[in-house]
Each structure stands twice: as C-alpha cells, then as structure tokens.
Image (spheres, rainbow, N blue to C red):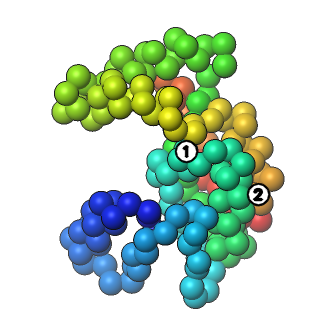
Amino acid sequence: MDVSPIMLKLLRAKIVDAGLRNIEVVQAGFLSYEHQGGPADFIYSRYALHHLPDFWKWVALVHLRRILRPGGVLRLWDVVYSFDPAEAEDRLEAWCASAGLDGEQGWTRAELEEHVREENSTFCWLLEPMIERSGFRIEDSSYSADGVFAKYVLRRF
C-alpha cells in the first residue's frame, strides 16, 4: 500500500523479481486504506508516517492496529528525532550538511532542508506515547547515531 504511483511501480517490480504471488498492491494511504480479508500478521512501514501531522499519526496507528490480529507486529522505520530539542539546530544542520550536493549520494542538502521545513517528523518522546496509546507495545526501538531516524518493533495487544 502506498499513495505514490512511482513507489507502487517499484514495489511491483520487487514482487516480480522475488517471484512472489501472495502480495496485493493497493494505492491508498494510512487513512484511506480499507483492509479486505482477515487480520494481518505483519505490517511494515518505512519512511511514511512522518508525512502526517501528529494528530493524524495517532489516527493512522489506530487504523493499523485494527488491521493487525492480536499479537500481530508492526515494523516501523521513520524519521523520528531522538535528540533533546535544545540540540535541534545543531543536529538538523549536521544532517542537512551530510547530504550530497548533486543527489548522487542519496538526498541533496536542499531536499533535506525541505524535509525539515515541510514534513511532519516528530520527537520520539512524542511518538512513543502515541504508539502505546494506540494499542501497541514497543518491543524494540533503536535510534541512529545522528538522532534523526528510529526503528521500532511494535506488537498489537
């Protein structure tokens, strides 16, 4: 599931390359997806939740919980700040400065600066209570050394 036709095209290619036949690709978002069939055992989200403001992050997490069976797992990777807010200026400057100038090394500095201005990344101390209040237990969490990314293993209770 993704809202982006480009990302769906890439996903379809990966599915074909892997020879998988049990995956359905759906164009939808966290808030618009309507699950068909039985509860899912596993959901994987990578660098998508930060597109939503905090209120809608919580709504999306509740929606994902409803899709999962009790005991099911949500694997969440995203842009989540794990540094103290007083460090934000220095940490975000260092992150933006780490980008390549031409995009050949991933993102350009201008793209990372745009992300900081326009996206809805949040602090772990805001996101983690949302995760728990939406009906998940955080089984594992890890944060990048620069304090910009987080990975979670969440279990529906």
Residue 132 screen position, x and y as percent? 77, 51
Q: Left or right? Give the position of 50 relative to 108.
A: right
Q: Which mark is residue 50?
A: 1
Residue 148 screen position, x and y as percent? 51, 30
Tell me what residue is drawn at x 61 percent, y 64 percent: 31
Q: Amino acid at mark 1?
A: His
Quarter of the figure with the C terminus? bottom right
Instruction: Classify 10 Å Cα crowding around label 1: few (below 14), some (14-19), many (20 and above).
Output: some
Tell me what residue is drawn at x 61 percent, y 86 percent: 38
Q: Tell me the element at label 2.
A: loop
Tell me what residue is drawn at x 49 percent, y 69 percent: 28
Q: Which mark is residue 134?
A: 2
Residue 105 screen position, x and y as percent? 23, 31
Residue 103 screen position, x and y as percent? 23, 32
Tell me what residue is drawn at x 31 percent, y 79 percent: 20
Q: Amino acid at mark 2?
A: Ser
Above or below residue 51? Residue 65 is: below
* Res. 142 visible in picture: no
Answer with the quarter of the image where residue 129 lies. top right
